[in-house]
Amino acid sequence: MLGGSAATAALSLAIVQAGKSHLAVHEALSGVFGSISLAAWIFLFVPQLLENYRRGNADGVSLWFIAIWFVGDVTNFFGAVGAGLVPTVVALAVYFCVADLILMLQCIFYNHINAKAESQPVAADDGSAEVDNVERPLLSRNASDSLYRADGRRRSSTAHPRRRSQSSVSARSALGSLSARKHGRIRAAVKHTASLLFVCVAGAVGWLLAWQAGAWAPTDQPSSDGSGVNISAGPQVLGYISAVSYLGARIPQIIKNYREQSCEGLSLLFFILSLFGNITYGASILLHSLDKDYLIVSLPWLLGSFGTMAEDIVIFVQFHIYSAKVDNSEAAVI
């Protein structure tokens, strides 16, 4: 609640300050949402980078996902510059390219290191395995002989209590695992909510400071006859290539998750910030102007932004389904 109040207060302060300086509310909101989007994208890759580092591998991430995304970000940058879009869009494009390269290099590094480790021959042990193999038949025979009495009749087996004991241990272990997962989800939900509130506050305050310092200024509004919008073929083509790349980037990741029936190794916060960033990114463009010609120029970026939101939702569904399967398998042991 405190974080939500802080975010609301920061947004309200930005609008009030804009009103005092005769800045149109929709322009102020466009700037605020664009700044919030920038904050979301700045922190977007951090959860996945930390997840890879914590696990010591990048097995959960499809390298094709990052590579195609990088192509989209490069074309997005050149298209945004050529189309003269709002400064936030251009700034985002530059950061995307840098962040993509960092995550891609991390994945390649871990994949190379782990592949090299797996290719090395396993060192010979100290012979304990051979001793264990020699003794195991004797132990098995002793265990088998002990099931019979001197008269040849089968003893009352003690295996059932032992199996019951082992079963109860397994049940307690599964129950403890379920409880730990439940508490882990609660902690994760709190962390994710706090992260989103922090992004909102940072974005709103960042825009306010940039605007007061003169680092941000609203771009010219398109005129009613469309003369304020310069539509050239080059940026439009690059924009559509970018949109197609964004839409296609998540497909390898979705397929990988489906084949492995798991989202293990992926950071849920990574996709939450992606969804939130796309929502505010698209809103910043729409709040700037609803002029038809301006929307035509911005259409590739709107398609890329809102289109990937649908694919992010698919990945959220995969997270839910595959985590539920793990819970059901553990519950079956109890």
Image: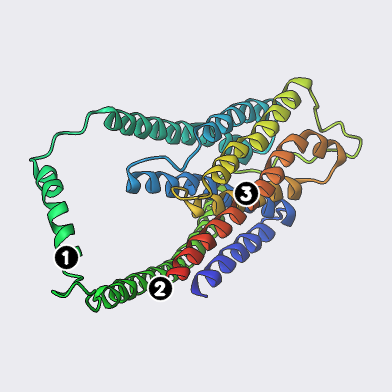
Outermost top residue: 234
Residue 264 seen in render: yes
Say which residue appears at 65% left-offset and 61% top-offset.
Answer: 15
- Looking at this view, is 104 or 146 the one in front? 146
Height in image: 68 above or below 191? above
Image quarter hosting the C terminus: bottom left
Say which residue appears at 49% left-offset and 61% top-offset.
Answer: 192
Amino acid on which the number 1 mark rests in the picture: Asp
Residue identifier under label 2: 179
Mark 1 in CB contact with mark 3 (< 8 angstroms): no
State the image coordinates of residue 259 (x, y, percent, origin top left): 55, 42
Amino acid on which the number 2 mark rests in the picture: Ser
How dense is the environment of label 3, judged by Cα within 10 Å: few (below 14), some, or many (20 and up)?
A: some
Indicate the secondary structure of the residue bearing disc 3. helix
Q: Looking at the image, tell me whether mark 1 or mark 2 is earlier in sequence order.
A: 1
Q: Which mark is on residue 191?
A: none
Q: Which mark is on residue 312?
A: 3
The span from disc 1 to disc 2 (Cα, nearest Å) is 42 Å
Where is residue 245, by image quadrant? top right
Say which residue appears at 25% left-offset and 76% top-offset.
Answer: 157
Tell me: 106 left or right of 65.
left
- Looking at this view, is 224 or 264 the one in front? 264
Q: Nearer the viewer, mark 1 or mark 3?
A: 1
Indicate the secondary structure of the residue bearing disc 1. helix
Height in image: 62 above or below 325? above
Amino acid on which the number 3 mark rests in the picture: Asp
State the image coordinates of residue 256 (x, y, percent, origin top left): 55, 40
- Looking at this view, is 214 or 309 the one in front? 309
